[in-house]
Amino acid sequence: RADLALYAAKEKGRDNLALFEPALDRKARERRETENDLREALTRGQMRMHYQSIVDLDSGETTGFEALLRWYHPSRGIIAPGEFLQIAEETGMITALGEWVIRQTLSDAASIPGEFRIAINLSPTQVKNPNLVATVAQAIHATGIVPERVELEITEHVLMDQGEAGHVTLLRLRELGVRIALDDFGTGYSSLAYLRRFPFDRIKIDRTFVTDVASDIGSQAIISTITRLADALGMDTTAEGIEDRRQLDILRKLGVHEAQGFLISRPVPPEEVTLIASDGTGEGDEQGMELSEEY
Ligand code: C2E
Ligand code: MG
Ligand code: MG
Ligand code: MG
């Protein structure tokens, strides 16, 4: 079969080879291409941070932004991290990429007017790296940002994989003055156990509970319970992935503190954040939605 495919491909010219390629080979080749392109992406200036606003559900005001990595690929367009983070992790490229993310985000933050909170995602490999604390400290020092404005988002995988070392790293980060949030809460195996092990500043309620909150009383019960638990533990709550008005209203009634999602704003490049941040109303939601496109 392979011979036949090759023969046919030769007949028709090299470009047609892909047509005969089994799906698995194609996946492997695409992965290799992504991996090779990724090696050059940072030095070629193809990475940018986008920012998604987070609002207070009582006041409607913007309280902060989450930094989300985007790859401006020369031929494939803007690529979200789901398509390359895993590869970055497996190849170790996440170290350089993650350090760049921290420096770039804090430097972007310095040019955003106002005292907004800036959230940065950290992968398990980043937290495993003993240099992380120094990287964060240096970036804070270089940009002069107040450390309390910086929030680092980790998932429970971090503590699961790294155990004691991860725990110590989080404590040292906390000593710098930065906040720590537990991301995607409720999706892992032992979310509750981690709340007891580490004094998080914030719980981010995963989008899966938000999606059907308007129609499913089970999701409502879970969100309401997470919120009361967070209140009792002195932690703030942010619900992720709000896409419509009904979700927003229910989340507010359930006592969730803050909300984030396409309804409020898509993640936008820094120059648009500056517009949202300086529009004075502190809402900037429609503006954000109008200006942003796919990402
Ligand atoms: P996350 O931290 O949970 O980020 C939220 C994700 O949900 C983002 O996807 C965001 O674009 C998306 N989102 C926000 N609102 C909505 C909504 O209303 N509906 C839907 N369907 N999606 C919404 P994104 O940007 O593709 O990032 C995916 C994940 O990649 C992030 O999940 C985070 O774990 C990771 N990530 C993103 N940026 C970075 C980074 O700079 N460093 C690291 N280590 N990880 C990152
Ligand atoms: Mg996050
Ligand atoms: Mg999340
Ligand atoms: Mg998520």
Image (cartoon, rainbow, N blue to C red):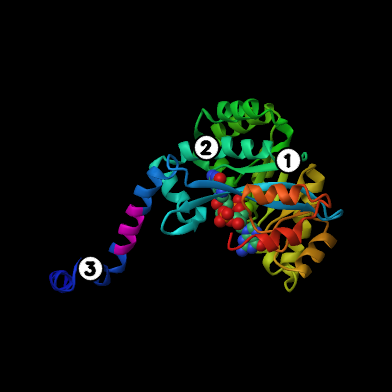
Q: Is residue 30 magenta?
A: yes
The first of marks 2 and 3 along the sequence is 3
Q: Quadrant of residue 115?
A: top right
* Mark toward the start of the polypeptide (1 vs 2): 2
Label drawn at residue 17: 3
| Residue 190 visible in the shown view | no
Residue 6 image offset from top left, x and y in percent: 15, 69
Residue 177 position within the rendered picture, expressed as x and y whole percent measured from the top left: 71, 29
Q: Main secondary structure of the magenta part?
A: helix
Q: Answer whether residue 16 is visible to the viewer in this image.
A: yes
Judging by the rendered image, the residue that carries numbered circle 1 is 201
Residue type marked 3: Leu
- Which residue is labeled 2 in the image? 100
154 vs 65, left or right, is left
Viewer-proximal residue among 286 and 244? 286
**Mark 2 surroundings within 10 Å by alpha-carbon count, few (fewer than 14), some (14 through 19), many (20 or more):** some
Q: Residue at coordinates 44% horizontally, 53% vertically from top-left? A: 73
Alpha-carbon distance for marks 2 and 3? 38 Å
What is the quadrant of the C terminus in the image?
A: bottom right
Q: Which amino acid type is shown beneath numbered disc 2?
A: Trp
Residue 130 horizontal side relative to residue 107, left or right:
left
Residue 184 shows which numbered tag?
none
Span colored in magenta: 26-33
Residues at circles 1 and 2 in contact by the CB criterion of under 8 Å: no
Which residue is found at the position 34% from the left and 54% from the top? Answer: 33
The answer to whether residue 230 is magenta is no
Mark 3 and mark 1 lie on one chain; the one further toward the N terminus is 3
Residue 22 placement (x, y as % from top left):
27, 69
